[in-house]
Amino acid sequence: MKSIHIQSFINYLEFEKRYSKHTIISYTNDLQNYTDFLAHYYPDLAIEAVGYQILRSWVVELAEADLNNKSINRKIATVRSLYKFLQLKGIITNNPTKLLKSPKIEKRLPDTIEQKSLFQLLSELQFDEDFSGIRDKLLIEMFYGTGMRLSELIELNHADISINNQQVKVLGKGNKERFIPLHQSLILLIKNYLDVKNNLFSCNPSQSFFVTDTGKQLYPMFVYRKVYHYLTLVTPKEKRSPHVLRHSFATHLLDAGADLNAIKEMLGHSSLAATQVYTHNSLEKLKAVFKKAHPKA
């Protein structure tokens, strides 16, 4: 991307908003797609001179490329953020994305893993007793026990884990800190992991908490592969990712009667609306129980 304004925007997201590396890559890729479109059809047009009709043509091209509506909406949101930034900086006076409409997305319930399957994985499956096995089990338990995001888990440092207070400090979206309680069995796993890790690697408070077998910070594909492998052992479901464990965390808490606002805080959602999607999962489960048990159903 040649535009100095786009580079300034990326720098703003990275250094001022402190977005994760994964998010920065997503923004960069979306903006590359947008600037490729402009370079092809409007090679002499500056980013700040783009109007609504050109943006609309870009969205149409995305749709004709058979992208799903969710992907299109993400790209639109990225470009909206860019022009809001340019308006904030006084580079443009009118935001051309103001009238741009996003395609409707069919609401889908979050994918989850059944409680009995996760219980089988975490209570009955024998993980290896070496560092790799101990770390892998804690990895799965941490996702399911806290509901944190993949990027949040990777960025954890030793100083973020408080065994005495039985909580973990998480740096979420928008550089917002939150504290998530750690249950007792998770505390025991953490202690065991630290004992083994300290014997293998030198540790300091600012060092990454989770590391590879060679002591380096975890990276997304490493974690994806681990989670996918272990979930494959207990469920035939197609989606077997860290985010599915996050969804399972929230859904199972709600099924057990946890307060929705408390779940919102632990997940790091900015609004309750984002958390309410899990109530639909619980409602569907209630309907299934009703249809199976009620004599008139």
Image: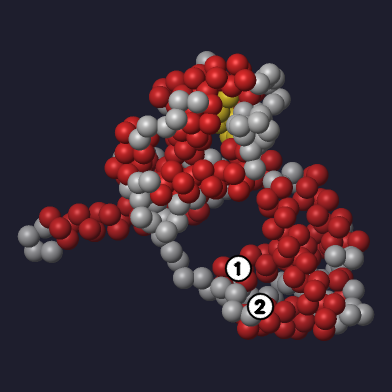
Q: Quadrant of residue 284?
A: bottom left
Q: In this rendering, would 203 be left or right of 129?
A: right
Residue 71, numbered circle: 1
Left/right of residue 223 with respect to residue 4 in the rendered view: left
**Residue 236, image x, y percentages:** 36, 55
Element carrying mark 1: helix
Mark 2 neighbour density, 10 Å: few (under 14) some (14–19) many (20 or more): some
Relative placement, left or right, of 202 versus 280 is right
Q: Residue at x 50, y 34 (%)?
A: 136
> Which residue is nearer to you in this view: 76 or 149?
149
At 53% from the left and 73% from the top, the residue drawn is 104
Q: Residue at x 55, y 48 (%)?
A: 224
The residue labelled by disc 2 is 62
Label 2 to label 1: alpha-carbon separation: 9 Å
As helix, strand or loop, the secondary structure at mark 2 comes to: helix
Q: Is residue 149 above or below residue 129?
A: below
Q: What's the mark number on residue 230?
A: none
Which quadrant, please, contains the C terminus? bottom left
Q: Nearer the viewer, residue 5 or 41?
A: 41
